[in-house]
Image (spheres, helix red, strand yellow):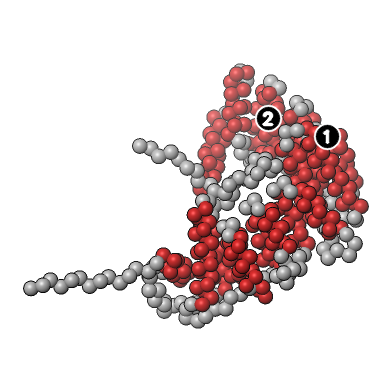
Amino acid sequence: MSSSSPAPSPPSPSPSRLVPQLLVALLQRRRFDSTLRPSPTFRGFSPHSIAAALAAIPRLLLPRSPRRLCPQRPFPATASSPANRRLAAALTLAFLSWSHDHAHPQQVPLSEAPLRAAALALARARALPALFRLLRSHTPLVSTAALTDVVRALGEEGLPRHALAAFHRMRQLRCAPDAQCYNTLIAALCQNGRFREARFLLDQMERPGARCAPDSYTYTVLISWYCRIGVGTGCRKAARRRIYEAGRLFRRMGEKGLEPDVVTYNCLINGLCKTYRVERAHEVFDEMLSKGCAPNRVTYNSFVRYYSVVNEVDKAVEWMREMVARGHGMASSSTYTPVIHSLCESGRVGEARRFLIEMAESGHLPREHTYKLVKDAIEDAGEEPLTGELCQSIEDGIKERCRQVMRIKPVMRPVRR
C-alpha cells in the first residue's frame, strides 16, 4: 500500500506583498492577516489615514540625524543604515501604489496629503531619484507647501545641493516659490555652511521687481546662523568676520525699512557677547530700548553669561536684578547657573550658597553639576551647610528630571552578563 504524499502547502506571499497589508491592518486596528479580509466596521480609507501611515514610515525606520557640534564640518552620517533607508523608500512607494490601486472597499484617488507625506518620507530616506520621479508623475497635485517641506527635510538630512535642486525644479512642477520657501531654503543652506548660496538667494530677493521680497525672518535666519557659526569657530579672526557680516545684515535690514524684532536683537547681542564685543552689544541694547522693542530674559542672559565668564560677577548680578526690576522677565536656572559658577570660582562660597537657596525657593531646580559644585565648595570652605530638607528636595527633583529624560530619550545600557 503506497503512502499518500502530503498535500503541497500553498506558497507563502512575498514580503513585498505583505507590507501594504500590514499597514492596512494597523490602520484598521486589527490583527494582521495575509488574506486581509475586510472588517465589518471598516468603511474605507481616507486621504488623512493614508497620509498618517506614510508619515509613520520614516518615524519608525529612520531615526533623526544627530545634531552637529560644529556646523562648518561635513554633516555626520544619519543614525539609520542604508538598508533601512532602502526599506523605507520601498515601503513608501509600495504602500502609496497599493492604496491608490487596491483600496478596499472603494478606490481612493490620490490627493495632495498622501503625496506630500510620501515625498517627505522619500526625502528622509534619501531616495532622491524616486522622489523626483514621484513629483514629476503627479505634477498637478504638487504644491508649494509640499516642496517647502521637501526642501526642509533635505536640508536637515545634510543634502543642501539636492535642496537647491528641488527648489529650482519648482517651475518645472508648475509651482511658484513664496517667501516661506525662500526662507526655508536659506535656513537649510546656512545649516550646512553654504553661506555663499544663501547670500545669492538673498540678493535675488532684494532685486527690484523680484517675486518675493525678503522679510524680517529672512534676515533673522542669516544673522542667527552667522552669529552661531562665528561663536563656534575656533579662529578669532573668522569669528570677528562672521559677526561683522551679521552686523552688516542687521544694518541692511534697517535700510530696507524692516524693523527687527526681539529675536533678531537677541541673536546679534548673543553673538557680540560671546565674541567679547560687549561695547557693541550695549549699543544694540540701547538701540533696542530706544525703538520700543522690549527685551526679554534671553537678552539679559547674554550679558549675565558674559560678565560671569570674564569674572565680573557683580555686574552679572546687577543685570539679573535689573531684569526683574524693569519687569522684562524673571530669573531662571539659565540665569542663576553662570552666576553661581562664577562665585564658586572666585571663592565667594557664601554668596553662591545664598543664590542656590534663592534659586531653589523660586521654584527653579539646579543642575546636578551646579548642586554638587556648591555643596563641595561649602564643605571645603567650612561654610554653613545646606539644610537637609533643601538637599532632599533638590536631589528628589534631580532624580525625577532624570526619569523624565529617560522616558523621552532612552539611552543604551550595557548588557549585564
Residue in the picture at 67% in, 34% down: 337
Kindly identify the amino acid type of the residue bearing the numbered disc 1: Arg
Residue in the picture at 76% in, 59% down: 182
Report whether residue 26 is seen.
Answer: no
In-front residue for pair 364/177: 177
Image quadrant containing the N terminus: bottom left
In-front residue for pair 396/222: 222
Q: Nearer the viewer, mark 2 or mark 1?
A: 1
Residue lying furthest bottom in this view? Answer: 106
Relative to 95, is 160 on the left or the right?
A: right
Report which residue position mark 2 lands on: 340
Image coordinates of residue 139 in percent, x first then y, are 66, 73
Work out whether mark 2 precedes mark 1 in sequence or the reverse, and give the earlier one. 1
> Mark 2, residues whose alpha carbon is within 10 Å: few (<14), some, or many (≥20)?
many
Image coordinates of residue 325 in percent, x first then y, are 80, 40
Report whether residue 310 is seen.
Answer: yes
Image quadrant containing the C terminus: top left
Report which residue position mark 1 lands on: 277
